[in-house]
Amino acid sequence: MKRLFAFAALLAATTPAFAITGDWIEDTVHPYVGLVVFYDAQGSFIWRCSGSLISPTKLVTAGHCADTAEGAASARVYFQQDAGANFNPATGKDPITGYPEECAAGTLGTLCATSSSIHNYGFANFAGFPNTHDAGVVILDQPITLPKYGVLPTAGVLETVGRGKKNTLFTVSGYGLTLRVNVHTKLSNVSFRERLMAQSSLIDFDRSQYTDGYNLETQGNGNNRGGTCSGDSGGPVFLGGASSNVIVAVTSFGKNELCRGADFGYRLDRQEVLDWINSQ
């Protein structure tokens, strides 16, 4: 089996850079998709991901983002479309939103929230692959009131709509890298630090060693499709076009560190996963 690369948060030691690859557009239609910054017990920034509110206080993300065993102790979520677009490397902060250190004045409880309650679905560094238990929940300290939230899927919906339909459409959203380059080149990663979205098409959800009923495999990158990359982890994979709010999976992993080829999301449309999310 090939090595897997989690599309997780960029670590604090790297240059902050964050979006969807391939053919993308700015995502202004999913305001409940946020940029999630995680901190250790000392309050230091350790990594960042994407995630989706399914209620005023419950945000769904990836298990490897909400990995308490690896040090995640608290979080802060930014819901601005351009949450990190004005990041200043010299100061280490976006002066408009406060990312990644604080909620800007007047945004706490409206466009930004903190969390001291982080949970994951038994994630253990991708052990037990392909059932990695890569789902997580972040409970916000301040409710975010919006006219619409993400919606959990009906159990088994992919078997209903995706069986034998390679043209089944999905929409991905997140704040991850748009282009990741080889560390040995002189080129730079491409980063917009904004919430972007793109459309992807179905490859498989139950017939390969990578999926086996637990993961959703989609095709991105070019030809009017878009993929996911570092920082998009935990972001939603919506069933359907841009207007959909049904989250059938959360962005989980890829097969290479350069974010090329197929993308994989951990399926939420399994009854045991739905039961766990609803119990948090």
Image (cartoon, rainbow, N blue to C red):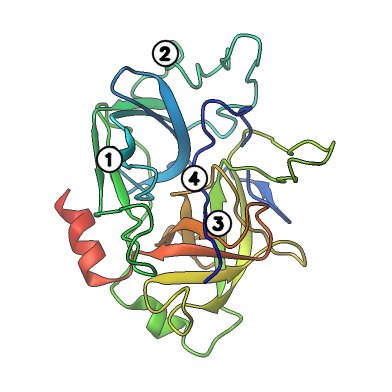
Residue indicated by mark 4? 8
SS label for mark 3? strand
Q: Amino acid at mark 1?
A: Ala
Q: Are marks 3 and 1 in contact (CB under 8 Å)?
A: no
Q: Amino acid at mark 2?
A: Gly
Q: Are marks 1 and 4 in contact (CB under 8 Å)?
A: no
**Crowding near the residue tagged with mark 2, few <14, some 14–19, many ≥20 C-alpha atoms within 10 Å:** few
**Crowding near the residue tagged with mark 1, few <14, some 14–19, many ≥20 C-alpha atoms within 10 Å:** few
First in residue order: circle 1 vs circle 4: 4
Camera-nearest residue between 117 and 13: 13
| CA separation in Å, label 1 and label 4 | 15 Å
Q: Are marks 3 and 4 in contact (CB under 8 Å)?
A: no
Residue indicated by mark 3? 172
First in residue order: circle 2 vs circle 3: 2
| Picture coordinates of residue 148, whole percent (x, y) | 38, 47
**Which is more foreground, mark 2 or mark 3?**
3
| Picture coordinates of residue 57, whole percent (x, y) | 26, 37
Residue 69: numbered disc:
1
Camera-nearest residue between 217 and 195: 217
**Which is more foreground, mark 1 or mark 2?**
1
Residue 216: numbered disc:
none
**Which is more foreground, mark 2 or mark 4?**
4
**Which is more foreground, mark 1 or mark 4?**
1
Quadrant for residue 200, please give it.
bottom right
Q: How many marks?
A: 4
- 182 horizontally vs 205: left or right: right
- 11 horizontally vs 52: left or right: right
Name the residue at 63% across, 49% down: 20
Residue indicated by mark 2? 106
